[in-house]
């Protein structure tokens, strides 16, 4: 039986930064939406509560992808999946 990922791209909002380039786009979800407006257009940038997903639509010629909108902290986890 093939393993499947339990995380789906449901209940996502745009992140405060939508994209860095035409090939790097972001979406996000929050761990808890308590205290947030249900009709919000984007999720806040909160390292405690926001999970950001970056979609890289074009593989670069170099092994470096610049995601300038991501501010790294000791809590940042980077995972790559190729589909």
Image (cartoon, rainbow, N blue to C red):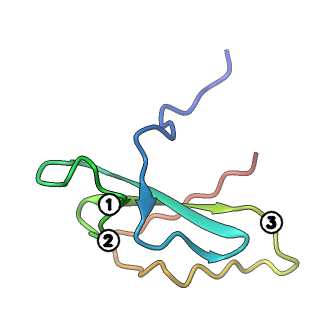
| Structural crowding at the residue carrying mark 3, measured as other residues with C-alpha within 10 Å and reported as few (<14), some (14–19) or many (≥20) | few
Q: How many discs appear?
A: 3
Q: Which residue: 47% across, 73% down?
A: 17
- Position of residue 75 relative to residue 40, above or below, is below
User: Answer yes or no: do the residues labelled 3 and 1 have beta carbons within 8 Å?
Assistant: no
Helix, strand, or loop for circle 1?
Answer: strand
Give the CA separation, mark 3 to mark 1.
25 Å
- Position of residue 8 relative to residue 36, above or below, is above
Q: Which residue: 52% across, 69% down?
A: 18
Q: Position of residue 46 (x, y in %)?
A: 27, 69
Helix, strand, or loop for circle 2?
Answer: loop
Mark 1 — residue?
A: 50
Q: Position of residue 29 (x, y in %)?
A: 37, 51
- Position of residue 10 relative to residue 57, above or below, is above
Work out which residue is located at the far top of the displayed protein and give it.
1
* Between 10 and 51, the one nearer to me in the picture: 10
Give the CA separation, mark 3 to mark 2.
25 Å
Mark 3 — residue?
A: 58
User: Answer yes or no: do the residues labelled 2 and 1 have beta carbons within 8 Å?
Assistant: yes
Helix, strand, or loop for circle 3?
Answer: loop
Give the CA separation, mark 2 to mark 1.
6 Å
Q: Decide if residue 36 is on the left or right side of residue 64.
A: left
Mark 2 — residue?
A: 45
């Amino acid at each position: 039986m093939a393993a499947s990922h339990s995380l789906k791209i449901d209940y996502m909002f745009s992140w405060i930064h939508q994209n860095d380039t035409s090939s790097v786009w972001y979406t996000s979800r929050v761990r808890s939406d308590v205290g947030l407006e249900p009709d919000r257009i984007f999720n806040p940038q909160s390292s405690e509560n926001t999970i950001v997903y970056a979609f890289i639509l074009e593989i670069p010629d170099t092994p470096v992808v610049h995601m300038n909108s991501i501010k790294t902290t000791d809590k940042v986890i980077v995972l790559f999946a190729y589909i």
